[in-house]
Amino acid sequence: MIRLEGLHKTYTSEGGVENHVLRGVDLAVADGELVALMGSSGSGKTTLLNVIGALDQSYRGRVVIAGQDLKGLGDKALSRFRNQTVGYIFQQFHLLPHLPVVDNVAMPRWFDGGAKRHDGDERAEVKRVLERVGLAHKLDARPGHLSGGEKQRVAIARALYAKPKILLCDEPTGALDSETSEVVLDLIARLNADEGLTVVVVTHDPYVASRCRRTVRIVDGQIVSDAAASAPAPPSDAGGAA
Ligand SMILES: Nc1ncnc2c1ncn2[C@@H]1O[C@H](COP(=O)(O)OP(=O)(O)OP(=O)(O)O)[C@@H](O)[C@H]1O
Ligand SMILES: [Mg+2]
């Protein structure tokens, strides 16, 4: 599902100073895997997710996602890829506060060749996806009136709405307390196990990583270890996802 070969990424500042952030990353993630990506701040985790999600096209190396070599895609195919193949979840949810939940979930499709639909079909479809995250009753709520965990579940619903094959999660529990994190992690694990979504979770938290079946560690833009999970760590106390 995800294949990276000899991936290099360098940021160049306006002054011409180069920051070689990804330094020869090779990684293969099979269909239906649940993988944690761990590494200290600045090690290149978000940069790596951005390449996988085709948000960043200036890299060296080979990137094949869901059978598509990203270098070979034209603009149209790329935006289709971003909208339909991958779903994103962020630490800070990135919901629009002035729009009700229903519009927050449906919005990506408005920019993907559609427009807001008023026929009731859109509402019904959004409701179905909200049911999968346990929030069908929040259809008309504003994000400001939701808890952090609810906001993240809305963000997950928004990602699911496009029926992606891959879910890319950048510190999905980083802004949540440990109890709420557990709800979000359960949901992510269920989407992976029951619906076969391939999931990559960037995290600093060993407990979050222990909920994944494989952990890839990155140090200074290079993968230093890649291992199947051992026994799960105990929740909350050791987790400290706050
Ligand atoms: N748009 C950018 N332009 C220039 N440099 C960048 C850009 N984005 C990230 N960097 C640099 O690339 C390096 C890796 O950043 P990245 O965001 O991938 O780290 P990270 O592992 O996600 O860290 P964190 O855990 O803090 O989120 C850092 O040195 C950062 O300063
Ligand atoms: Mg990051």
Image (spheres, rainbow, N blue to C red):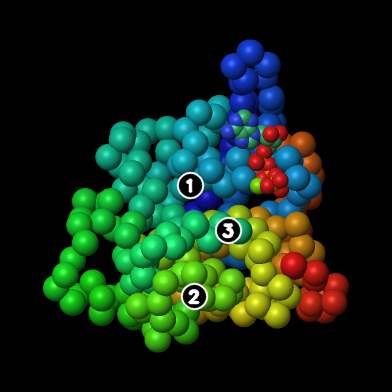
Does residue 163 appear in this view? no
- Is 163 on the left-hand or right-hand side of 88? left
Q: Which residue is mark 1?
A: 53
Q: Quadrant of residue 212?
A: bottom right
Packing grade of label 3 (10 A; few <14, some 14-19, many >=20) is: some
Packing grade of label 1 (10 A; few <14, some 14-19, many >=20) is: many
**Badge 3 or badge 1: first in the primary sequence:** 1
- Element type at mark 2: helix
Q: Is residue 242 above or below residue 43?
A: below
x and y, in percent, of residue 21 in the image: 68, 32
Q: Residue at x 54, y 69 (%)?
A: 152
Q: Which residue is mark 3?
A: 92
Q: Quadrant of residue 157?
A: bottom left
Q: Which residue is mark 2?
A: 145
x and y, in percent, of residue 41 in the image: 75, 45
Instruction: Calculate the distance from the C-alpha at mark 2 to the C-alpha at mark 1.
Output: 30 Å
**Badge 2 or badge 3: first in the primary sequence:** 3
Instruction: Calculate the distance from the C-alpha at mark 2 to the C-alpha at mark 3.
Output: 15 Å
x and y, in percent, of residue 83 in the image: 36, 52
Return the residue found at the far right. Answer: 238
Give the residue type that dot 2 points to: His
Return the residue found at the far left. Answer: 119
**Badge 2 or badge 1: first in the primary sequence:** 1
